[in-house]
């Protein structure tokens, strides 16, 4: 989650609030102008990631894997990837490069994702959710 300091909040108040919020998970202090972006990325991102997980599993189902197994493996793949990104502090492009072998299965799959516009669709989803968050915060 993120928090934005009000103009009357000092460092001690901000640190106290951050320590309370961190009891629920990671908390970052950001400028007020970035709160709606957080909503578009993290708040809505849960549904975006679930949609991607479902699509991964459905690809495996299409190829013959049982549904329950496909969904469990897709979820574990997302969990493992997230853990590696957080633990190593790597940029996602570096981890992606590390797992692609020349003429291998992964680079062929990446090519299919790029042809389908995955990257642009994900960026547009965050942009649309952020714009909607800004609209709602004005009401």
Image (spheres, rainbow, N blue to C red):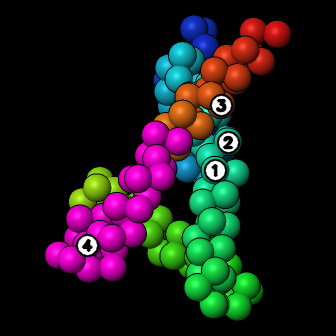
Mark 3 touches mark 2? (CB < 8 Å): yes
Q: Position of residue 94 (x, y in %)?
A: 24, 60
Write the residue at 28% across / 55% down: 93
Q: CA distance from mark 1 to mark 4?
A: 24 Å
Residue depicted at x 64% and y 80%: 62
* 3D distance between C-alphas at marks 1 and 2: 7 Å
Structural crowding at the residue carrying mark 3, measured as other residues with C-alpha within 10 Å and reported as few (<14), some (14–19) or many (≥20): many
Tell me, for residue 48, which label it has, or none: 1
Look at discs 4 and 2 and give the one toward the viewer: 4
Q: SS of the residue at dot 3?
A: helix
What residue is drawn where x is 47% and y is 65%? Answer: 82
| Residue 79 picture quarter | bottom right
Frontmost of labels 3 and 4 is 4
Q: Residue beneath label 4, please?
A: 100
- Neighbour tally class for label 2: few under 14, some 14-19, many 20 plus, Cα within 10 Å: some
Secondary element under disc 2, as helix, strand or loop, is loop
Q: Position of residue 119 (x, y in %)?
A: 44, 46
Q: Is residue 16 visible?
A: no
Separation of residues labelled 3 and 2 (CA atoms): 7 Å
**Mark 1 vs mark 2: in front:** 1
Q: What is the CA distance from the residue labelled 4 to the residue labelled 2?
A: 29 Å
Please tell me how crowded label 1 is: few (under 14), some (14-19), or many (20+) other residues with Cα within 10 Å: some
Task: Give, as a single range, the part of the protein colored magenta.
Answer: 95-121
Q: Which residue is mark 3?
A: 129
């Amino acid at each position: 989650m993120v928090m934005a300091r009000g103009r009357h909040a000092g460092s001690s108040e901000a640190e106290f609030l951050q320590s309370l919020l961190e009891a629920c998970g990671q908390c970052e202090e950001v400028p007020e102008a970035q709160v709606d972006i957080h909503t578009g990325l993290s708040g809505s991102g849960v549904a975006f990631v679930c949609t991607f997980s479902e699509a991964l599993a459905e690809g495996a189902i299409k190829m013959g894997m049982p549904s329950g197994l496909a969904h469990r493996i897709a979820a574990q793949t997302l969990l493992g990837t997230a853990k590696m990104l957080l633990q190593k502090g790597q940029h996602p492009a570096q981890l992606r490069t590390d797992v692609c072998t020349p003429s291998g299965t992964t680079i062929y799959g990446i090519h299919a994702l790029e042809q389908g516009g995955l990257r642009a669709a994900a960026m547009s989803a965050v942009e649309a959710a952020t714009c909607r968050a800004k609209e709602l915060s004005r009401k």
